Structures are given as structure tokens and as C-alpha cells.
Amino acid sequence: MLKLGLATGGTALVGSPSTDAQLLSPHDRPVDLEVKPSPPTTPFVVPLPIPPVAQPIPVSRLDPPPDPARHQRYDEFPAQKFYEFRQSQFLHSYHPELGPTVSWGYGGITPGPTIHARWGEPLFVRMHNDLPADHVGFAAPSTSTHVHNMHTASESDGFPMNYINPGEYYDHHYAMSPAGGDRREHMHSMWYHDHRMDFTAPNVYAGLSAFFLAFDEEDSGDENSSDPRAWRLPSGKYDVPLMLHDVLFDEKGQAAFDVFNTDGLLGDKFTVNRAIQPYFQVEPRKYRFRIQNGGVSRFYQFFLSTGQPFTVISNDGNMLPRPIISDSIHLSVAQRSDVIIDFSQNQPGDQIYLQNRLEQVFGQGPTGRLLDAGDNVMRFDVVPLKLPDHSRIPEKFRPLPPINLAEVDRERLWVFDYNGGLWTINGGAADMSEPSAVIPQDSTEIWIIRNGGGDWSHPVHIHFEEFQIIEFNGKPISRDEIRYARKDVLTLGPSDEVKLYLKFRDFLGKYVMHCHNVVHEDHAMMVRWDIVPS
């Protein structure tokens, strides 16, 4: 009732195409359901926006000062850098042929400022909610910020019920210490976004998302480094974050969101860093692109129009043991992939398109069918080389932590399905008041994740701890697969069953697992699980 009430006011943040037809269940929804298309826009007239890097502030500017007693292990990992962000409403331009769109974001922009962090340098972030308290529209002006998938204490994880209202703030402490103190578990390409209970999809769709990038001695952010440990990956302006959102606009150029849709929203405009089909000038050299699927429900499979390959170096923010050459990249919702594209064989004047060829129709998950051409999401325009390319691609990165099945303390089964009008896990709807699993600290478990339905794929996200896939539909994972890595999002196709290996270390408290098709999450496909003293 709260959602429907928020939808009735008719402000710029409201959109509800074909709502009379969209009261159907996912299993009853017609495949050919029509949605009014967005106004036309000319592609490749907008340069790719690059979010600014967030700047730390002196701790003296925080009033009141940080309270170490609110955070687990703060004295062990005292904050060395301090940040203060404000969530606000503003006008954002997706394209010059559309009017300014009412949007939400961090620091008055979307995507918000990119946080550059380093492992071993703990951070403190104060998040203010300056959103309009009298807002009426599809989003909710109360928020909970989650750094996906930071290894952090429960009170700083963005638990969906730990939300703040306009005029309030919330303090987050990030120890920047890897799981178990094992540097093999460093993560590198992350993002932060809203995680408010029942409103994650509309709040992120409205603009509340941004990058969080972490560096260390190996992934140093300096391609000219003389440190023998440094990988010397493309850095600086050659290290480019790309956040993807598909958006639907109404006839006035405002972002439209259907509050009656419970199965998944697909936009007909592809945006990168919140610009519709931008172009980006590249020199004939190597670039690192951090590709992030920040959308609501759409899956992607990317190709380059020239047939050039991607060198894949990470999966879900975790470095692969070694680079893998691939002609395409598959990303379900919230997944990330760091890739190197080498333009050195291209000539100034060449134009190369990043294309999504994965078919997905309204009211369904991805069909699995690849289109011959697909949609051009952005364009790379090759320009003359300005400086020599000193970056390199190492033959290997770091090994994965070992899997020791002898340490396993327990096995659990989680079944993702659709029952009685709700998306469910183990037959139940989301209940954040009680945990569905109580896990002793420092234990090791096998989780079997099963898709009980045959209609949708579910990008399953487990907070706090990354996992390693042991088996996919009864078969072991090959070392040559990109998903042979530590991950935090599992792409669970229809009727799939996957066996995962997880450890639970360092912090106590409540966490969640959910479908990151965030429309499913907001409609009950989430469970709470707690880590307790052993």
C-alpha cells in the first residue's frame, strides 16, 4: 500500500506505462505486452561522462565526530580517510534532445563521485539524506547505502532496514582489510548504491549509484610504477569506469518507472554513466574498462563491432588467476567485469561500437538467444596517440584461495522460486525481523542455490563474503572459465543448481542474500542470515 500511495502523486519521478495490463503475475504476463516507447534520441552525440573522484575531508569537519563505539573493530582499524556525502534531488541531462530529468544522486550528480580507496587504509563515510521529505513519486526518500560487495561489519553494510529519512545521516566504517586478512581476497572494482527495503529498484533507478574502486601494491593504479610488484595495468585516464543503466522515458523526457511491475523492468534507452549512447575518444593503445551492470533487470552480452577480443582480468571485482581472452562478456544485473581493450591496431578515424546482442523481452528474463547485431550501447572513436603506452597485461595475477572441503561445517539449500504472487526463497517472503540462517563465526559452509522456476534467471547476490563455485549443474568449473573466480553475484538460469563454497569471518551481525533483479528483491526475494559468535 505504501508503494501504491507513493505512485499516485504524479510528480516528475512517476511513470507507469500500461499499468492496467501489468497487474498480471510473471507466469501470466503476455510476452507481447506493449510499453510506450521513449521519445527518439540521436545516438553518439554525447561524450562519455566520467564521474569525479571523491575527495577526503579533515575529520575536524565532521560534526559530531565519529563514534568508534558504533563500529566493530574500529580501534583495530582506525579510519585514515574521511568522506561526507549528501543524497539530494536535482536535474540531470541524459541527452540534449530530452528535457532535464528529475534525478537523485550522491553529491548532486549521478553516478555519484567515485571513491578511490586502498587496502590497508580504513575509511569513514558519513552519508546525509537531503532528499525532499515531501517527495511524491516512484522512489522513497529514505535510504540505506550498500557498498557492493565490501567485506565490512554488518552495521556498515547497508542492511535494508538500516535506513535514514530526510534530515538524518548514517556513519559507515570500512576497515579495508580483506576477508581473513588474506590479500588474495582483495576486491578492486566495486560500487555503492541504495539498498532501502522494498525500494532498492526505484531508488537506484532514480540515480543513487556510484563507483568504489580499491587499489593495492599490485593493482596500483600506476602503469609507470617502478615497484616490481605492480601489474602496471592501464591507469589514470586510461582506466575508465562504465556504469550501465537501461532507462525508459515518458513523453516529457522524465524517467518512467512502473510500480505495478513485479517481474522486471526493461528500458529502451541504453545509458553509460547516465548518458544515452555516448561516444568516447580512445587513443591507439591499451585501456582498462570497468564495466558495471547497474541496472534493474536487464542482462547483457557484449561484443565489439569489429570482432576484436576482450582481455578479461576480473569478475565481480575479483581478479582472475590469469587473464582470459574472450570475444564477448556476459553480465547479469550487478555483475562487473574489468577488461582490457587494445586499440593499438586501430587507426585514427576508426569507430568501434560496444554492442549488446543478448535478447531479452519485456516480462521475461534473457532468452539466451544472441542477435546478429543487437544494440549499440556506446561508440569508441579512435584519435591519434598522445603519449607512449607503458601499460602491460601480466601473464598471471594472484592465485585463488584454496578450497578445503574437509573444513566444511554445514551444507544449506536455498531454492529461488515464485509462489502465491511473490518471489520467494525456500518458499517464504522476505522477513528481516528474523534470520533464516544462523552461522557461527569462522565456519565454512556449502550453499546449494537452486532455481525452482523455469521463467526467469536470477542474479543471486550474497552480501559480505565472496564465494567460489564448486559445481554448476553437477559439473565442476573449468579453470578456463571466467566464472572460475571469487564472485559475489551468481547468474542462476532457469532450473539451474549451483554448489558454492563460503567462509564466514571477521565480523558479526545480520546480512542478506537476494536476487539482484532488484524488482524481484523488492517483491520479497531476499533472506536474512546472521553471523554469531562461535
Image (cartoon, rainbow, N blue to C red):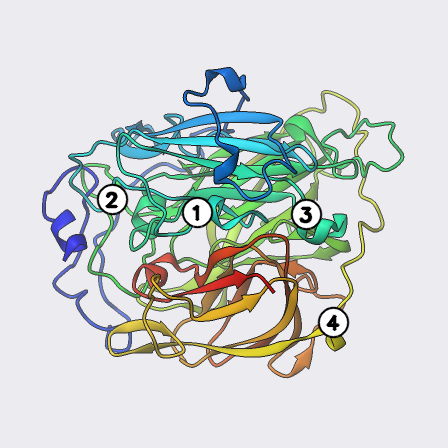
Q: Nearer the viewer, residue 429 or 232?
A: 429
Q: Which residue is mark 3?
A: 178
Asked which quadrant contains residue 392, the reply is top right
The earlier-in-sequence mark between 1 and 3 is: 1
Mark 2 burial class by Cα count in 10 Å: few <14, some 14-19, many 20+: many
| Image x and y of residue 60, in percent | 50, 15
- Which residue carries the number 2 mark? 140
Label 1 element class: loop
N-terminal of the pair, mark 4 or mark 1, is 1
Above-or-below relation of 286 to 292: above
Q: Give residue 411's quadrant in the image.
A: bottom right
List x then y, in percent, for residue 371: 49, 63
Please name the amino acid that badge 3 sits on. Pro
The disc labelled 2 sits on which kind of residue? Ala
Q: Say left or right for 530 vs 363.
A: right
Q: Is residue 448 visible?
A: yes
Q: Circle 1: is it few (<14), some (14-19), or many (20+) Cα within 10 Å? A: many
